[in-house]
Amino acid sequence: MKHNINTMLGACAIGTTAMLIGMAVPADAETIRWARKADSLTLDPHAQNEGPTHTLTHQIYEPLLHRDMSAKIVPALAQSWAPTKDPTIWEFKLRKGVTFHDGATFTADDVVFSFKRAMKQTSAMKELLASVTDIIKIDDHTVHIKTKGANPLLPNNLTNLFVMDEGWSKKNGAADPQDFENGKNNHAVTNANGTGAYMITSRAPDAKTVLKANPKYWGRGKFPLEVTEIVYTPIKSPATRVAALLSGEVDIIQDVPVQDLRRVASDAKLKVVKAAQNRTIFFGMNVGDADLKSDNVEGKNPLADVRVRQAINIAINRPAIQKVVMRGQSAPTGVIMPPFVNGWTKALDGHPKYDVNKAKALLKEAGYANGFGITLNCPNNRYINDEAICQAAAAMLGRIGIKVTLDAKPKAQHFPLIKKKETDFYLLGWGVPTFDSEYIFNYLVHSTTDKLGSWNGTRFSNADLDKKIEGLASETNLDKRNKVIAEIWAVVQKEVLYAAIHNQVLNWGMTKRINFPVQPEDQPHFKYLKFNK
């Protein structure tokens, strides 16, 4: 039975049941002390679709399908999957003998509950299930997922959709996902009960989280599982983070500051492991509102004029940001899509030439010869040198008369501004776990509805384009599907909804005692880590 459809999309591929439950941990297993810039936003597995949040969640909870350290889709809680004779139904055979951390048995009921939970309004994961009409339990270890039409890419959408224990969730008042944007909490925000390789033993948000190995994990004998304890410490300060690695206080940091790469690599006890990341950094612009709240232009929206957006796009000197801000550790681009993604082309990737004079002429033509003022919202603890990128862009835009007021905040305060449409001009980074353009369109291009467009801070809305985006989920002719994808990208690029800056390059710094390749989605799955003997 086929259970990996990545071969259907060339860009998607980069590549026992419960056993020995009471088995003792390996004698050479030990603690890993792990640090990165910022913490997970929540433990609720459906409340935030955000990289660092998923990273911690992946240690504790599991999806049906999982991307391994090479980003290849492999079995997790589902042992096999395939479309049925009815092309609108996918069948998933579930792994037997799996238990949650509290000892409860994992069954199809938990999958049905979790997927329906992930489809609710407060879920940040609902776009991934936009084509799903029903989740049906066939028996305790078989689930059918029904879609509006044949959806050949459904499995690609499931690698970050985590399964919760239905009984535990309902008992603890967490049947619905946390309403993160409105500051609401539930039991699942600070407590967890997954099937994963590690269990929470203590949690102090933004300070320290400690996990221990799950002694009854179904994957014993399948994964190395040499790590018996994980101590996770968010360290915002780049200097402090590097100092902790150099002194041996931590064993691995995911985000070595670009200015410290040589220093870390030259240490005899350490190494830097690099890889291109499946993530693009870009600026979003409010093109839809009649008037902006954060500018100094009364009664108009300068960003609604495509000439202004074009001016902003060519006023940003991407090679300079790459050289000065990123120290060479980025790949300038002109599209909000990294090369891993189906739909990417070299032509789309080409970024516009930096041209101050042309940008000024476009502003003048649009009626803003003297420029205007606007606030730029930026995170300061999420992406590599995020605030520094915004500072550089603000200076560049100042050269064409756009006076930028920079407002940099931690990601926990920044992201709700985009989701709640409270920012006119903002920095965002986007990874594509499905490795397909549809994911980008569903979140960032489609009109904002109760199911789609939740991260479309541009307010852009095009009914014809929405229909094309929705049709991608059920288009089985891949040539036709890719043609539609190209048509959608042509509109996105023509409208200049976003000013793409670059694709990130990952630099993990770690002790030479461990063998741990960089995962393209920046997801260190510690159950794969091995210690060098």
Image: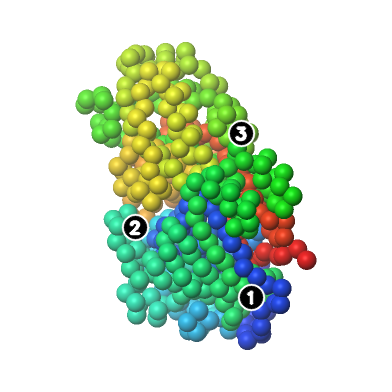
Could you say which disc has been placed on residue 219 in the image?
Answer: 1
| 101 lies above or below 364 | below
Whole-Å distance between the Cαs marked 1 and 3? 40 Å
| Mark with earlier residue (2, 1) | 2
In this rendered view, identify the residue nearer to me: 38 or 61: 38
Question: Residue 472 versus residue 413: which sits nearer the camera?
Answer: 413
State the mark number for residue 97. none
Query: In the drawing, does residue 503 fall left or right of residue 119?
Result: right
Which residue is painted at 51% across and 68% down in the image?
A: 210
Report the label total. 3
User: Is residue 525 visible to the viewer in this orientation of the structure?
Assistant: yes
Which numbered disc flags the more N-terminal residue, 2 or 3?
A: 2
Residue 94 as seen in the image, left or right of residue 284: right
Name the residue: 39% across, 68% down.
190
The amino acid marked with disc number 2 is Phe
Residue labelled with disc 2:
180
Amino acid type for the residue under numbered disc 3: Arg
Q: Are marks 2 and 1 in contact (CB under 8 Å)?
A: no
Residue of label 3: 327
Give how far apart the Cα atoms at labels 2 and 3 are: 35 Å
Indicate whether 187 appears above or below 470.
below
Q: Position of residue 487 (x, y in %)?
A: 51, 37
Pick the quarter of the image with the N terminus: bottom right
Of the numbered discs 1 and 3, the one sitting upstream in the chain is 1
The residue located at (48%, 34%) in the rendering is 388
- Residue 269: horizontal and vertical position, in percent? 72, 53
Amino acid type at circle 1 is: Gly
